[in-house]
Image (cartoon, helix red, strand yellow):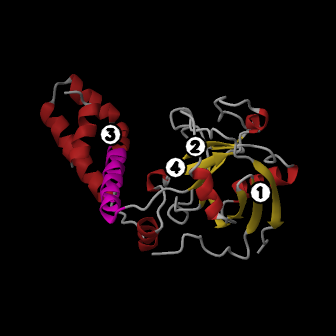
Amino acid sequence: MAMLLTAWTLIFPQTMSTEPKTADPNDALVEIKTTLGDVTVELYNDTPLHRDNFLKLVDKGFYDGVLFHRVIDEFMVQTGDPKSKQASAGVELGDGDPGYTIEAEIRYPRHFHKYGALAAARTGDAVNPERRSSGSQFYIVTGKKVPAGRLDAMERRNFEERLQERFRELSLQHNDSIKKLRLAHDSIGLENLRRELIRQTEESVKPEPLPEVIKEAYTTVGGTPHLDGTYTVFGEVVKGMDVVEKIQKVETDPSDRPVEDVRIISAKVIRRPSEE
């Protein structure tokens, strides 16, 4: 209710293994050789735009030689900027791409930001409201274990945000009526409408508890739950998280670029996706 009142005043200013699961035999596998070791990733079949684009870039050798240009301990490691291949030491990176973006394929809660998740980087909502993914940049989640109480708080916050968003949608639908009531200085009519919109909001938006499998993953192996539902997760590491751990622990500069370059030497497809 408090969130709805806030929205109204805005409108009317007055223990699991640390190694991820065995890959699905129908999914594609890609081996990524880095200067710190090898990582094998599985690409999900239900995010076909991202899967096929990733395979296309691997086949072209696009990732060969790129740096892990953004590394944050207990968060993620990011790579895929083509400008990083010949970048001088200390140069800030992260705006390179193949010249296109990819339509979002957000499959939450089926795919979420657990430890080892493979996800597409993108620009922020302010300039990218459709949440389209970078054509080449991706990150691997490391994160950290999340206390159960924090997950409960996130559930409540997400519910309140959904309530507020629905309330705003309904308010926009009644914008003409609101303007008329305001012009007429009809405070009683405004209050009655406010109560009606709150009633409709609370009837249409129900709490959505986190599935137990997600809670278990975040509390036992960790991840970055605050990114869920906003970025496309299109795969996961099935071998080599020890290498990802090494990468996330390297020394970085103020822009989160490793002081000593960590590079993808090569990437190759070791299994194509099943057509079934």
- The image shows residue 213 at horizontal and vertical percentages of 46, 73
Report the residue marked by disc 1: 33
Report the residue marked by disc 3: 171
- SS class, disc 3: helix
Query: Relative to the observer, which residue lies in front, 21 or 233?
Result: 21
Q: Is residue 90 left or right of residue 197?
A: right
Q: Is residue 121 left or right of residue 276?
A: left
Tell me, yes or no, whether the two marked residues, 2 and 1, touch with CB atoms within 8 Å.
no
- SS class, disc 4: loop
Q: Which residues are magenta?
A: 147-167
Mark 3 or mark 1, earlier in chain: 1
- The image shows residue 77 at horizontal and vertical percentages of 60, 49
Tell me, yes or no, whether the two marked residues, 2 and 4, touch with CB atoms within 8 Å.
no
Which numbered mark, 2 or 4, is in the foreground of this view?
A: 2
**CA–CA distance between discs 4 and 1?**
21 Å
Q: Is residue 83 above or below residue 156?
A: above
